[in-house]
Amino acid sequence: NDQVQAVVLPERGAELYRQHCAACHGPGGKPVLPTAPDFTQHNTLLKPDLTLLAAIRKGRGAMPGYDGVLRERDILDIVTHLRTLR
């Protein structure tokens, strides 16, 4: 296989989460805003990575879209970090 696997960096995702997400979603995944999802609940993150990537890019409700703000790799690192919060 000639394809190179992208390296997932959960620690980088944790730092990006602190910078871009924690103010609304809470430092440990418990939401600060009442409409934000609770990332500590198992069912919140049952969607595939690419579905979560698309939602973060586009934004939803009060959450702005991060397309053009964060690279795809950065968003996937954040998703990897989110999966550690359960």
Image (spheres, rainbow, N blue to C red):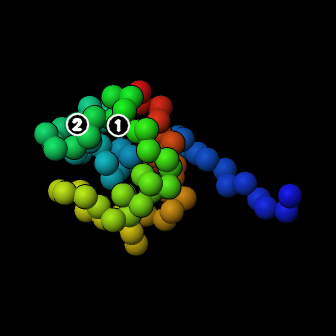
Closest to the observer, 82 or 49: 49
Residue 13 lies left or right of residue 32; in this view the side is right
Q: Position of residue 49 (x, y in %)?
A: 50, 49
- The nearer-to-camera label among 2 and 1 is 1
How many numbered marks does the figure carry?
2
Q: Earlier in the sequence, mark 2 or mark 1?
A: 2
Residue type at tag 1:
Thr
Mark 2, residues whose alpha carbon is within 10 Å: few (<14), some, or many (≥20)? some
Q: CA distance from mark 2 to mark 1?
A: 12 Å
Q: Which residue is mark 1?
A: 44
Residue 73 position in % (x across, y down): 54, 59
Among all residues in the image, which is located at the extreme right? 1
* The quadrant where residue 65 appears: bottom left
Which residue is at a point 40% across and 39% down the rendered structure image? 45
- Residue 50, horizontal then vertical, whole percent: 50, 55
Q: In the orientation shown, which residue stands out farthest toward the left?
A: 34
**Is 55 situated above or below 21?**
below
Q: Circles 2 and 1: CB distance less than 8 Å?
A: no
Closer to the camera in the image, 23 or 76 = 76
Q: Residue at x 86, y 58 (%)?
A: 1
Q: In which quadrant will I find the C terminus?
A: top left
Relative to 5, does residue 36 appear above or below in the rendering? above
Q: Is 83 on the left or on the right of 31, as rendered?
A: right
Asked if residue 76 shows in the view, the reply is yes
Give how far across and how far down residue 47 sits, in percent: 44, 44
Residue denoted by label 2: 31
**Amino acid identity at mark 2:** Pro
Tag shown at residue 6? none
